Image (cartoon, helix red, strand yellow):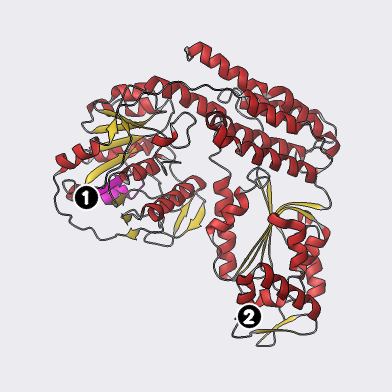
Amino acid sequence: MDIALFEKNIKFLYDNFPHYYNLVKNIKTRNYKILNDNIIDINGNKLYPNSVEEDSKKFAYYPTHNELWERKFYMIKPYFWEKEFNVTGKIVNKMINKAKTIRNYTEEGFYFDRDFLPTVAVFGILAGKHIDLLVEKFEFQSLFVYEPNPEFFAISLYFTDYEKIYKKLKDRFFLWVNGKLDFFAIERFYYERKVTSSFLTLSLKTYNHPLIDDAVSKFEQIRAQKLRGWGTYEDEKKGVLNHFENINRYKVLVKKTDLDIPVCVVANGKSLEKNIEFIKKNQNSMIIISVGTAIKPLLKAGIESDFHIEQERIDILKDVLKDILPKYKGYFIGSNVVKKEVFEMAKKPLMYFREAFSFSPKEYQIPGSSPIVGNAGFAIASFFTKKIYLCGMDLGYRIGERKHASGSFYDSKDDKTLNGIKIEGNFSDDIYTDSLFLSSKTNIEKMIEMENLEVYNLSDGAYIKGSVPLKDYIDLPCIDKEKYINEMLDCFDDINIDFPDVDLYPLLKSVKNVLNKKVEDYKHLTGLIDFIDNAFDTYEKTHSVEYSLLRGSISHILNYLYILSHKIKKKDINKLQEILKKELIRFEKDFKSMRIDKGFR
């Protein structure tokens, strides 16, 4: 126990983190004390089996090879699919092929620097000596420390030099003390260095507590969520082709209104089977917006939605809808990246501009309409009203049960899942989700808060923060649907869009220039990739179209560079850099070729 260190820490907190200073100052009860190099609880039990010094050394011993630490790797695909990703796939596969020819390439394991650690999360400070030892011995990609008990944080001030930690790690050190760990803190931790934090997360639990279990679960949820949805150049290009075949042909959603009526967004979660009764009973009392594959179960139940929304650019969509959409009497709202054949099947086609798509004009994009079509339905509903009912918007499932309603596209599919991320359920505590549903849920929650929406959730899946779970069905008063539909249609208008000037070369050159830098070890590689990642983001404002086209693929390519580099000796990393420098020009050549082939000038 070091009194001088305690006083130094108190001054540091007072000067730099007054909220932590006040937290320590205002601790009312003392349940622990420091005695004989250990922490003793009020019953006389030791928290460290041996001593603070001895057990902290065990915690801090080489986390990459320490059984006390959990290791979560991002496992790369053996080869990227070149048929679907003709440019990104070729570049990635050239790196893979090159890496495999390098002497000492390891198929199973990874190489690490002895004094540098990838993403590290420590759950539980206790005396904090293990954190002090870790920072003394290692450099970090980033370090997150969570402690739910302020008293342990106070005790750690005698053992841990926080000023030294902050000076060494700067913005790579994240500290959260007291209470439940916030989702957004974890998001910030992961997303500030999206690529290099994807490879490996090392995590340590120093003691068991429900709040620590909650924090570990949240970390895993955000980690899983972060590993998807990056997109690719090829996805964007497919959307570009569809976009320019659709624009200037249909009225586009361009403005909001605020109608004092309920709008029901109907998705195709399994609980739609139960929600059908509510929708049937109130179909003349609310505007019904169906999304994705929910249209078929609704029609089967004799319910025709007022609007139907599709968002995806996939080829299969026209086959899924070919027997439904030509007969559908409601208004079809497709995103600008949906294939033109789908629009042409609809009797009453309308359009909206998909969020975060490279060629969608910023002023007309629908905020909150990604990542899935359910988000598009919710976001579009918020353009018309503040009062929204959710049916079949499960965004979660029960292990071993089907995820979608019967009578839909998924009847012939393997629709059951045997694992997932445990989350709070809307009506029960046996609900799980996956990273895509979790991302969708998070975006809906943000929309509810930002737009101050009144949301009632009848879906038997994930709890959506800010919504009111509604298990008992209610009767809503009838409305003049025709009048309100016409008011909604007034929010759509004709606009004209031209093909913008696109020049990928400056962005590709900026990446290539950084790749010229010599990499000496994995720490330098981490810094180099973080630099490219951050520098590339600066183009979002100045070259937004080019940025959106390339962003996803650049992330994937950097991710493979980072992971593959850990499968070869550090002296050979430059060989993979050379491959990238030669191959990046493929993007520019491919885009120019597409423009010429399709006559886009």
Residue name at image x 68 percent, y 36 percent? 558
Residue name at image x 69 percent, y 43 percent? 530
Residue behind mark 1: 261
Estimate the x, y position of residue 460 in percent, counting from the top left.
35, 55
Of residues 264 and 381, which is closer to you in this image?
A: 381
Please state which amino acid type lies under the numbered disc 2: Lys
Residue name at image x 63 percent, y 26 percent? 89
Q: Quadrant of residue 463?
A: bottom left
Residue 102, which numbered label? none
Query: Does any portion of residue 2 appear in the rendered image?
Result: no
Of residues 327 and 480, which is closer to you in this image?
A: 480
State whether residue 32 is above or below residue 424. Answer: below
Of residues 400 and 392, which is closer to you in this image?
A: 392
Left or right: where 254 falls relative to 473: right
Estimate the x, y position of residue 282 in percent, counting from the top left.
18, 50
Give the CA distance from mark 1 to mark 2: 51 Å
Residue behind mark 2: 25
State whether residue 441 is above or below residue 157. Answer: above
Magenta-span inclusion, residue 278: yes
Magenta residue span: 262-279
Estimate the x, y position of residue 274 in percent, counting from the top left.
28, 51
Q: Earlier in the sequence, mark 1 or mark 2?
A: 2
Query: Does any portion of residue 301 appear in the rendered image?
Result: yes
Estimate the x, y position of residue 153 in percent, counting from the top left.
67, 73
| 10 Å crowding of disc 1: few (<14), some (14-19), many (20+) | many
Left or right: where 397 falls relative to 298: right
| 10 Å crowding of disc 2: few (<14), some (14-19), many (20+) | few
Magenta-span inclusion, residue 171: no
**Secondary element at tag 1:** loop
Kindly report which numbered mark, 1 or 2, lies closer to the viewer in this rendering. 2
State whether residue 92 is above or below residue 255. Answer: above
Please state which amino acid type lies under the numbered disc 1: Ile
